[in-house]
Image: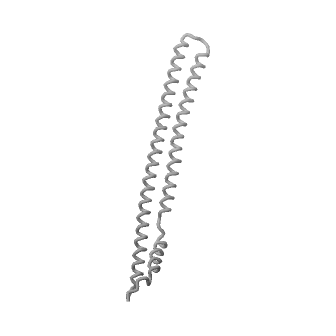
Amino acid sequence: MCDPGLLLGIASGVASVAAQGAAMDQNRKMINQQSKLEYAAAERERLVKDNEANKQSYQAQLQADRNSSALKAAGEGMGGATAGQRIAEQQRQGALSIANAKDAKDAANANYTASTQGTQIEAVNGINKNTMNPFSAFMNVATSGLQNYGTLKLG
């Protein structure tokens, strides 16, 4: 006949391992939710920066076109290379502004990639920390049963 203390100890160990497993499952869910929130925040930030860069680029192009048109109109009938040089300088400034806006867009994409990779690594590490070792679970059950062996003597 089996010792009742042993059975109660084993049942206690099984309950303890089940509770640990449930807590670990909840922790994994929370880690996944947190990483999804961080991904959403990173995506929002990337979109804001991307849209800002697009607007700057468009504004720079409009300004370059406006300046070139004004110089051409002012230089009508004017001889020499001055008007052409001024127009070329305005075009160069416009191209530089557009390039700066494109750089800002590229930076937003690079920051998004780095941020999401960091979030992914952190989530995987957190989930790995919250994974139960089957051997440890078995030993917890076995030692719980053995600790109570012989405590309830019926006879």
Q: Position of residue 27 (x, y in %)?
A: 44, 59
Report the residue at 43% width, 56% height from top: 30
Q: Position of residue 128 (x, y in %)?
A: 49, 62
Residue toward you, 16 or 22? 16
Above or below, 46 relative to 13: above
Report the residue at 47% width, 79% height from top: 147
Q: Position of residue 135 (x, y in %)?
A: 48, 73
84 horizontally vs 147: left or right:
right
The furthest residue to the top: 77
Report the residue at 39% width, 80% height from top: 7
Q: Position of residue 134 (x, y in %)?
A: 46, 71
Above or below, 126 relative to 72: below
Total marks placed: 0
Report the coloring of the rendering. Answer: one colour
In which quadrant of the rendered image does the C terminus lie?
bottom left
Report the residue at 41% width, 60% height from top: 26
In which quadrant of the rendered image does the N terminus lie?
bottom left
The furthest residue to the right: 81
Residue toward you, 43 or 31? 31
Above or below, 18 relative to 123: below
Above or below, 5 relative to 27: below
